Image (cartoon, grey):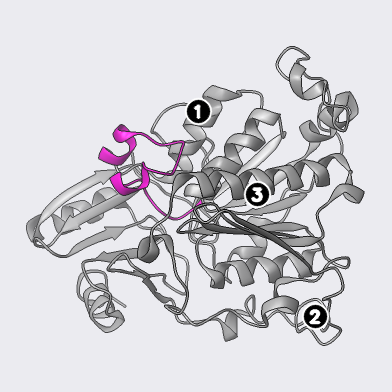
Amino acid sequence: MNIETDSGSIQTYRSKGSNEPNEPLVLNSPVSTDAPTAFSAARYSRQLLFAPIGEQGQAKLIQSRVAIVGMGALGTVLANHMVRAGVGFVRLIDRDFVEASNLQRQMLYDEADATASAPKAIAAADRLKQANSLVELEPVVCDLNPTNAEELLSGVDLILDGTDNFSVRFLINDVSQKLGIPWIYGGAVSSRGVSLTVIPGVTPCLRCLFGQAPAQGTTETCDTAGVIGPIIHTVASHQSTEAFKLLVGAKEQLNRKMVHWDLWYNQHSAVDVSKARRSDCPACGQGQYDYLDQEAADDTIQTMCGRNSVQIQPVHRAVFDLAEWAERWRPLGTIESNPFLLKLHLDETVTLVLFPDGRLLVQGTDDPVTAKSLYSRYIGM
């Protein structure tokens, strides 16, 4: 099935338990104050018995709207907790597709998803719908970037960080500060993890603490340093608990510290950052959103650290008919496709992965110049 939308809209699809995309959804819907509050006492019985949540808290969870950025290791655990707890609306944002190397730590996927190169957002939504069909899920197969971040992250009560790079986190931080939406930072690599709750106007933001995003390639990632599964669950469980506190209104119980773990070496620490807000912070102090500023945004070419791949995102949104492109590319190499992406294996080392919005992943090189040359040759600039 071809994927077609208006050139000015973002590709989003509600999962209905199949691999076929359904009707595009409209984003930027306002946070609902009229959401149903009825719920199954049997389904949530153990959660209802937990006094800080109880019936009133459960009703608030059902009315809540959450966006999760990144459906990898952290994101899948976060989504699992949100959906099973009964959060009424969950938007799942991820640009990637399932690969065999994901299965060690990304809990919502299986070998069939990897074989099919299923988009993570779609595969996750299909699995989550089986866990709780009462939750509204909105999977978004898309790269979060300065051109779409406000649109994708609006209309929610909370943003959860399931990403694996700082440039996206600083972009989330800008949106959070501009729109006044809390977000919860989480990171995990090797056996180490960190988490921080950011509330606009109340707590320090990411730029208060770190100034700016570190240069690409200067920090460890799961693809370069590895990661063990337990630290993923530790960090995501802390993020999820903070999320529940925020959503049910237990803000006095929020952890105002940046929490660190190293499970392998039995280390745990918490740094009080409650007084680290800076009046000269570009984001929360001055209202300057450098990472959201489209004109100041980085190039649309991004090296995928540790994956020997380069992603190219066109500046202008486009609509690519994957079936049509499959026919164009068929004489050039081996073709693989599903409703959400098209792969062209040029040779044993280079594979092009095309998405409906014109985004191209060049696998087999980490050289942006080579990747741009291949994009120009096989797509056109």
Residue 356: x %, y % from top left: 38, 55
Q: Residue at x 86, y 34 (%)?
A: 34
Residue 44: x %, y % from top left: 74, 20
Mark 1: amino acid:
Lys
Mark 3: amino acid:
Ala
Mark 1 or mark 2: which comes first in sequence?
1
Region of the chain picked out in magenta, as a range: 94-115
Question: Judging from the image, what secondary structure is the residue with disc 2 in?
Answer: loop
Q: In the shown orientation, is residue 309 left or right of residue 137?
A: left
Read off the residue under disc 3.
Answer: 67
Nearer to me, 157 or 324: 157
Query: Compared with residue 369, is residue 66 higher up or lower down, i.e. above or below?
Result: above
Query: Compared with residue 64, is residue 165 higher up or lower down, i.e. above or below?
Result: below
Read off the residue under disc 2.
Answer: 287
Mark 2: amino acid:
Gly
Q: Residue at x 35, y 45 (%)?
A: 98
Query: Compared with residue 380, is residue 92 higher up or lower down, i.e. above or below?
Result: above
Q: Does 198 lie within the magenta span?
A: no
Q: Residues within 10 Å of mark 1 (few under 14, many from 20)?
A: some
Judged from this view, the residue extending furthest toward the top is 42
